[in-house]
Image: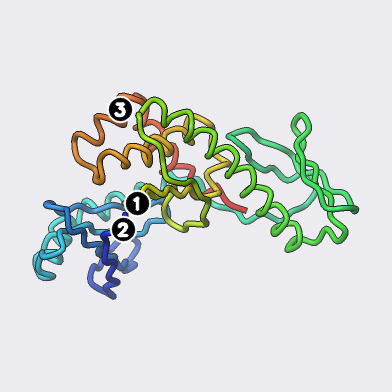
Amino acid sequence: MTNTIPLILKPALKLRADMLEYDYRIVRKTNRKTTSIIIKANNEIEVRAPTRMPQQLIERFVQSKHAWIEKKLLFNRDHRTEYIPKSFTHGELFLLLGRTYRLKLETGKRSVQTEADKLLVSHPSPQPENLRRQLTRWYRQQAEITFTQRSRIISELIGKQAKSIGIKAYKSRWGSCHADGRIYYNWRLIMAPEWVIDYVVVHELCHLIHHNHSKAYWQLVESIAPDFRKAKSWLNTNGVSLDL
């Protein structure tokens, strides 16, 4: 959303999970009336608060949620899928739309395609870094095609069209909806199952009507994606593994 003022506080919040300290980020919003804490897929802690709320009150609120934050961080550590960086070698597994493909490398003209359960990649110099760049471009292309199509279809259910659809490389979010109607999606989401992608599309498109996470907003989301909680849980557990 556009009306945010991100502030980094270091170190404002100290958690004793494994004797580590965690910082948190405050995002102030002009149209917000309550304060909440969000723990993102990468364990980043974000505190969302009204613009005029005093800093001292925000810090007091966070401290009051200390036990809950620690519990969530420990749960995430124990239950989330571990991210293992790709080595880009023959036989390595890659995800696309929730399906698994086994990498098959060739030396030759640049190309990427799927065939049955194979991900066929050709490059004049198939070194890991070259393959990473090539596959990143290909994944972004697939993401733009898929997310544009799904957004167009789901927009008809909501009765509202986005001004434009774009792809970005977010580190800690799967999508964003701007006040002027522009929507961006994280290209890495193309690795997730289609029903999870649809939830994120619904999530962002519903912001065209409700520019917040109010009760009315979540009711609209649920009316279109009844299993949205399952999709959110899937992303919380597996989101970190959606990368190259």
User: Which badge, 2 or 1, comes first in the chain's sequence?
Assistant: 2
Q: Do the CB atoms of the residues marked 2 and 1 lie less than 8 Å apart?
A: yes
Label 3, secondary structure: give it.
helix
Relative to the observer, which residue lies in front, 9 or 52?
52
Relative to the observer, which residue lies in front, 183 or 60?
183
Residue 36 percent location from the top left of the image: 19, 52
Other residues around mark 2 within 10 Å, as few (<14) / some (14–19) / many (≥20) = few
Name which residue type carries label 3.
Answer: Glu
Residue at the spot 37% in from the left edge and 47% down from the top edge: 181
Q: Do the CB atoms of the residues marked 2 and 3 lie less than 8 Å apart?
A: no
Q: Which of marks 2 and 1 is in front?
A: 1
CA separation, marks 2 and 1?
A: 9 Å
The numbered mark at residue 54 is: none
The numbered mark at residue 222 is: 3
The residue that disc 1 covers is: 180
The residue that disc 2 covers is: 2
Other residues around mark 3 within 10 Å, as few (<14) / some (14–19) / many (≥20) = some
Residue 59 percent location from the top left of the image: 15, 66
Residue 154 percent location from the top left of the image: 43, 29
User: Which badge, 2 or 3, comes first in the chain's sequence?
Assistant: 2
